[in-house]
Image (cartoon, rainbow, N blue to C red):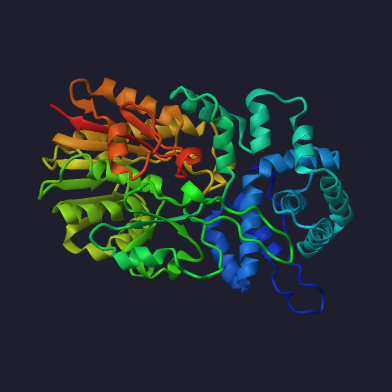
């Protein structure tokens, strides 16, 4: 991100006990940790909310304030740059973060000016930036003096092309260019603004009803949880919730967005999904429907023969592995779930704990498969490859500021090595699903073309788009062809990429 590390202060006051932690202070602390310590907001924010003992309304306010400020950081920096008369690089990091939070309240949450400005100035004092309270007050009042539309015009001046879209929709320019290229590969040249806008909308919670385990009652009760607490944003957060005392936020769209696209999908969940009985029992899992379709494209690409062996090469943290394990159990197959990182392997074991002897969890580098000449082959292989994550920016907003274009070649090299390992252990007639949560062409179509060149006569491409359409319960709006690219602005899923291959030698 743009800001440099800086101290934050304690904000306790001399001679007094600690002040109660406010929703704004929680949001500030998480925002600083995301930048200074490379923390993940989805992991840190719930813990900070619990530690602060925030009410449901204040927790919802802190959630929207944190995620909204991170998503729109690029746009808000351009606005602060103009309003302050300084380059944001020359503003102290802690002061800049305070103003980012204030700007989001004014422009993103429609908080009344007096409440947003006075509370943000007080936050500056609380975090040890008393020296800058006058500056913060003056800048935020200038921000409040213009409408959202007027600021769009102001920050657009002198910019054009992808740089203009990057500033308007708060994405790095290189990401905008990569998304433009990915859409152009489908001959979709007029959807870029809609895609960028979709990345800035908090996604609703989506659940997966595990086949063979979830009951009709689980599904029926999943959308009837009455709990005003904010949903966790670790992968399936709901839209923002209004705080009556400090303003409102736009409502989440209904209609088609509430209709599932995955046959195992459930949408429309409100409140904390952990309170859903089926989730608590493990029969329902929090999982984006794009991830569900990616896993089901492999398991349902052909009829399952009892005794098949399946491999999930990069299984952590276990979401797709759990869905595959359920599908394998229904069909009489056995799943081996591999994960490199021990901590993530522990999450996989937890996710698969209820499947007994039908699954095996192993640890190690996925590139090792097939290197030792072992005779073990797998009938279905899922390679959910490590990637830039550009397809899940709405769920992990900090990723857009952390990833750099120079990260792509290193990831692409790793993806290619993992693909070669997957080919080595794929049984004749077996099916391989190459999946990324990124639409970047170097991580998607480029990898498909390259693996076919490296293994001539070994692999054939399947009609992935046709398989995904056959699996989905409503039109997934994927382009025709041997690959399938999902898009958040079309069907409300992460931008998952799927390519299916069959070994023919």
68 left or right, relative to 334: right
Q: Residue at x 66, y 56 (%)?
A: 65
335 left or right, relative to 403: left
How many marks do you count on the picture?
Answer: 0
Image spot of residue 438 (x, y percent)? 44, 37
Q: Quadrant of the C terminus?
A: top left
Q: Quadrant of the N terminus?
A: top right
Q: Residue at x 27, y 33 (%)?
A: 500
Out of 361 and 296, give the one closest to the viewer.
Answer: 296
Q: Residue furthest front?
A: 255
Q: Residue at x 60, y 57 (%)?
A: 240
Image spot of residue 54 (x, y percent)? 63, 71
Rendered view: 395 above or below 417: below
Q: Can residue 393 be seen in the rendering of this structure?
A: yes
Rendered view: 466 above or below 130: above
Q: Can residue 88 be seen in the rendering of this structure?
A: no
Image spot of residue 421 (x, y percent)? 25, 35
Rendered view: 234 above or below 186: below
Out of 226 and 30, give the one closest to the viewer.
Answer: 226
362 left or right, relative to 347: left
Out of 449 and 342, give the one closest to the viewer.
Answer: 449
Image spot of residue 402 (x, y percent)? 57, 42
Q: Residue at x 49, y 66 (%)?
A: 272
């Amino acid at each position: 991100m743009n800001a440099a590390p800086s101290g934050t202060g304690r904000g306790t006051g001399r001679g007094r006990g600690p002040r109660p932690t406010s929703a704004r202070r929680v949001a500030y602390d998480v925002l600083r940790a995301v930048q200074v310590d490379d923390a993940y907001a989805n992991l840190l924010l719930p813990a900070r909310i619990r530690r602060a003992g925030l009410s449901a309304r204040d927790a919802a306010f802190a959630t929207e304030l944190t995620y909204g400020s991170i998503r729109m950081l690029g746009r808000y920096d351009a606005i602060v740059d103009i309003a302050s008369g300084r380059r944001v690089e020359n503003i102290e990091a802690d002061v800049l973060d305070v103003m980012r939070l204030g700007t989001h309240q004014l422009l993103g949450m429609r908080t009344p000016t007096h409440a947003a400005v006075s509370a943000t100035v007080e936050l500056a004092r609380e975090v040890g930036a008393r020296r800058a309270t006058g500056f913060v007050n003056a800048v935020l009042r200038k921000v409040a003096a213009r409408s959202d539309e007027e600021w769009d015009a102001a920050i657009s001046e002198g910019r054009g092309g992808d740089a203009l879209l990057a500033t308007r929709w708060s994405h790095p320019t290189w990401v905008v260019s990569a998304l433009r290229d990915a859409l152009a590969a489908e001959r979709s040249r007029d959807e870029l603004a809609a895609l960028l806008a979709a990345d800035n909308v908090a996604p609703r919670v989506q659940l997966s009803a595990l086949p063979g385990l979830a009951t009709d009652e689980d599904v029926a009760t999943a959308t009837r949880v009455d709990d005003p607490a904010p949903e966790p944003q670790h992968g399936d957060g709901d839209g923002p919730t209004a705080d009556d005392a400090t303003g409102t936020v736009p409502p989440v769209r209904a209609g088609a967005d509430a209709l599932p696209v995955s046959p195992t999908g459930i949408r429309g969940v409100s409140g904390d999904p952990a309170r859903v009985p089926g989730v608590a029992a493990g029969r329902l899992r929090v999982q984006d429907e794009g991830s569900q379709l990616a896993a089901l494209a492999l398991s349902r690409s052909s009829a399952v023969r009892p005794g098949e062996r399946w491999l999930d090469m990069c299984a952590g943290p276990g979401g797709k592995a759990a869905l595959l394990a359920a599908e394998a159990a229904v069909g009489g197959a056995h799943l081996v779930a591999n994960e490199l990182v021990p901590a993530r392997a522990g999450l996989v074991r937890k996710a698969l704990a209820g499947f007994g002897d039908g699954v095996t969890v192993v640890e190690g580098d996925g590139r090792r498969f097939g290197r030792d000449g072992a005779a073990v082959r797998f009938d279905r292989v899922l390679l959910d490859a490590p990637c830039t994550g550009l397809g899940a920016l709405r769920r992990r907003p900090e990723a857009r500021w952390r990833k750099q274009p120079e990260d792509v070649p290193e990831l692409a090299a790793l993806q290619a090595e993992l693909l070669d390992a997957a080919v080595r252990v794929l049984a004749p007639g077996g099916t391989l699903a190459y999946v990324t949560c990124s639409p970047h062409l170097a991580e998607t179509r480029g990898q498909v073309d390259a693996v076919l060149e490296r293994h001539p006569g070994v692999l054939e491409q399947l009609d992935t788009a046709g398989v995904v359409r056959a699996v989905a319960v409503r039109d997934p709006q994927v382009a025709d062809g041997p690959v399938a690219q999902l898009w958040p602005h079309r069907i409300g899923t992460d931008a998952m990429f799927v390519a299916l291959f069959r070994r023919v030698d």
